[in-house]
Image: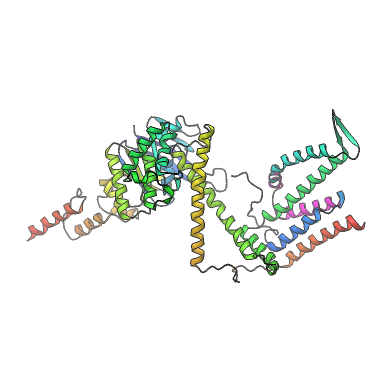
């Protein structure tokens, strides 16, 4: 079951002088099992959009279809709890949500809320912690005394322990060091391979290029472009048009094309590109 | 959070908004003293007329003032009950079984009601027309003379303005943490008692952690910019009393004098 937005609008503080339209008549569909990037400038409605996925925000008008649930504007959503279990939402800087005495307890908090027994919850928590690369020495430590990166991993483990079928990430690597960010992205890629639908809000085009399959570009509360990565990054023209700095490899390809080399659209890594160029240089003699 | 009206600044452009905060705070204090002088009903009528005129001048709507008084209704009912039970002087007006309602009980309650009403009107006139930052500037200036006896006026003003500055931030933060915990299956509305305690805990602990974090960040930022408590500093915004400010203070003094005359010399 795909995720579908039908004429969804969201208005903040309606009926007051602070009225603000964050989403306007959004129609879009997100394929099940895809790794989708949501990009766009600050204030374009990205975060508002993703918060509709687990009914934290309800549409002011229109309907959101998530898995087999419908969230219709003006009605109390049913089966809210099971929806929140199936759609795991990781907020920006999720380390602020930690509160328990120990790491294990904090990660097990989610599963427990969704009705898992304490043993089950602990098992799920341990699994999730291993996935995020935290070994058993962390389990009994206080989450508040960990480093920033470790806190982030505990917080993300807290969502993964719920075993969500759809994982929604709002700038999950913001503020992490490059090595930590890479590890994090690889974790999401492996979850995606296992069949989880991943939706990620990000500003990092390198990440979009490397890990994602689909892109949604938001602008002024509306999806401006929705396409697959290959089309999006065929060359840098689309990025330039949107005022986005294209990934380094795409810029490289553009520069090479300008110099008269032929570069395939399918080349997505630096090694293949190097080989391609080497071949052409050699044949020229 | 939208129904808290008491003490909120209402951005309007009126003669009262433009007055110096020191004059307004001073006038408010004088008027509050005037209320507590037993000048009888004539006195209250005069104060009421003056305050109504001020509310009118400040362009505040009377429904707004009424709204900020609503939370007091419960207190008034409570007061009436206590007074009826305790006060046994004057003539009996009403007999409800074993309970006798004396005239003084009702009159005393009425006095308190009127005093409270006037106090709320006066303080609302101040808080609704003065920006929080201007208010702290005013408080700082008014506390200045007490520095000789060791009152840290600048620090007090700084404390107040920092506290006011962080209120909207903490409200936002609460919203964010609520959403994050709701995503983890916390139900803040329903649930058994122990679940509810857990839900509130999951909100309060992160809120405290981030409030302390913010405090530390702010302290560092202030220190990095050379902030030193207790050192004399110049100000960007210099308060200066003008004609209307003196008029306001003179008016307040006149009202106070009038009350004293009514109460003691007539």
Q: Is residue B23 left or right of residue B163?
A: right
The magenta-colored residue range is B41-66
Does residue B210 lie above or below B155 as drawn?
A: above
Is A34 magenta? The answer is no
Q: Nearer the viewer, residue B52 or A122?
A: A122
Outermost residue toward the right? B266
Image quadrant in which you'd find residue A104 = top left
In x, y percent, where is residue A206?
Answer: 29, 52
Colour scheme: rainbow
From where the camera sits, is residue A159 visible? yes
Outermost residue toward the top? B97
Q: Is residue A91 left or right of residue B1?
A: left
In x, y percent, where is residue B222?
Answer: 51, 64
Q: Nearer the viewer, residue A45 or B144?
A: B144
Q: Is residue B98 left or right of residue B192?
A: right
Q: Residue at x 75, y 60 (%)?
A: B27
Count the labels in the image: 0
- The quarter of the rendered structure image containing the N terminus of chain A is top left
In x, y percent, where is residue A150?
Answer: 37, 50
Q: Nearer the viewer, residue A190 or A199?
A: A190
Secondary structure of the magenta portion, mostly? Answer: helix
From where the camera sits, is residue A216 visible? no
Q: Nearer the viewer, residue A260 or A263?
A: A263
- The quarter of the rendered structure image containing the C terminus of chain A is bottom left
Q: Is residue A265 left or right of residue A130?
A: left
In x, y percent, where is residue A154?
Answer: 38, 45
Image quadrant in which you'd find residue B87 = top right
């Amino acid at each position: 079951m795909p995720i579908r937005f039908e004429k969804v609008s969201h208005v903040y503080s309606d009926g007051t002088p602070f009225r603000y339209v964050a989403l306007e008549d959004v129609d879009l569909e997100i394929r099940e099992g895809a790794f989708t990037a949501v990009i766009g400038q600050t204030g374009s409605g990205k975060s508002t959009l993703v918060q509709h996925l687990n009914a934290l925000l309800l549409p002011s008008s229109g309907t959101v279809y998530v898995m087999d649930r419908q969230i219709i504007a003006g009605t109390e959503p049913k089966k809210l709890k099971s929806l929140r279990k199936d759609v795991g939402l990781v907020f920006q800087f999720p380390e602020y949500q930690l509160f328990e005495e120990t790491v294990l307890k904090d990660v097990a908090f989610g599963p427990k809320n969704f009705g898992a027994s304490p043993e089950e919850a602990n098992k799920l928590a341990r699994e999730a912690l291993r996935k995020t690369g935290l070994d058993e020495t962390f389990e009994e430590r206080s989450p508040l005394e960990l480093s920033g990166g470790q806190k982030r991993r505990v917080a993300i483990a807290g969502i993964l322990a719920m075993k969500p079928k759809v994982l929604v990430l709002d700038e999950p690597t913001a503020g992490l060091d490059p090595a930590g960010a890479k590890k994090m992205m690889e974790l999401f890629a492996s979850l995606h391979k296992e069949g989880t639908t991943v939706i990620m809000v990000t500003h990092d085009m390198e990440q979009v290029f490397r890990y994602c399959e689909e892109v949604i570009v938001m602008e002024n509360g509306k999806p401006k472009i929705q396409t697959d990565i290959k089309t999006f990054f065929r060359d840098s023209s689309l990025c330039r048009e949107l005022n986005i700095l294209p990934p380094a490899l795409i810029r490289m390809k553009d520069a090479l094309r300008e110099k008269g080399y032929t570069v395939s659209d399918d080349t997505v890594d630096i090694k293949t590109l190097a080989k391609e160029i080497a071949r052409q240089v050699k044949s020229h003699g | 959070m939208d129904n808290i009206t008491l003490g909120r600044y209402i951005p309007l452009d009126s003669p009262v908004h433009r007055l110096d905060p020191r004059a307004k705070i001073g006038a408010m204090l004088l008027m509050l003293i005037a209320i507590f002088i037993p000048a009888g009903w004539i006195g209250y009528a005069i104060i009421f007329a003056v305050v109504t005129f001020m509310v009118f001048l400040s362009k505040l709507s009377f429904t707004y003032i009424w709204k900020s008084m609503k939370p007091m209704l419960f207190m008034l009912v409570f007061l009436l009950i206590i007074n009826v039970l305790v006060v046994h002087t004057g003539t009996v007006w009403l007999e409800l079984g074993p309970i006798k309602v004396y005239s003084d009980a009702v009159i005393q309650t009425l006095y308190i009601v009127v005093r409270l009403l006037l106090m709320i009107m006066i303080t609302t006139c101040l808080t609704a027309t003065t920006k929080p930052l201007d208010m702290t500037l005013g408080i700082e200036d008014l506390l200045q003379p007490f520095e000789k006896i060791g009152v840290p006026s600048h620090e007090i003003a700084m404390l107040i303005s920092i506290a006011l500055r962080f209120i909207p931030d903490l409200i936002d933060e609460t919203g964010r943490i609520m959403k994050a915990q709701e995503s983890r299956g916390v139900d803040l509305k329903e649930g058994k008692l122990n679940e509810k305690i857990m839900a509130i805990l999951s909100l309060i602990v992160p809120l405290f952690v981030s409030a302390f974090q913010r405090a530390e960040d702010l302290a560092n930022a202030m220190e990095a910019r050379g902030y030193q408590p207790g050192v004399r500093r110049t100000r960007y915004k210099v308060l200066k009393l003008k004609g209307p400010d003196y008029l306001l203070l003179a008016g307040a003094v006149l009202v106070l004098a009038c009350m004293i005359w009514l109460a003691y010399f007539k």
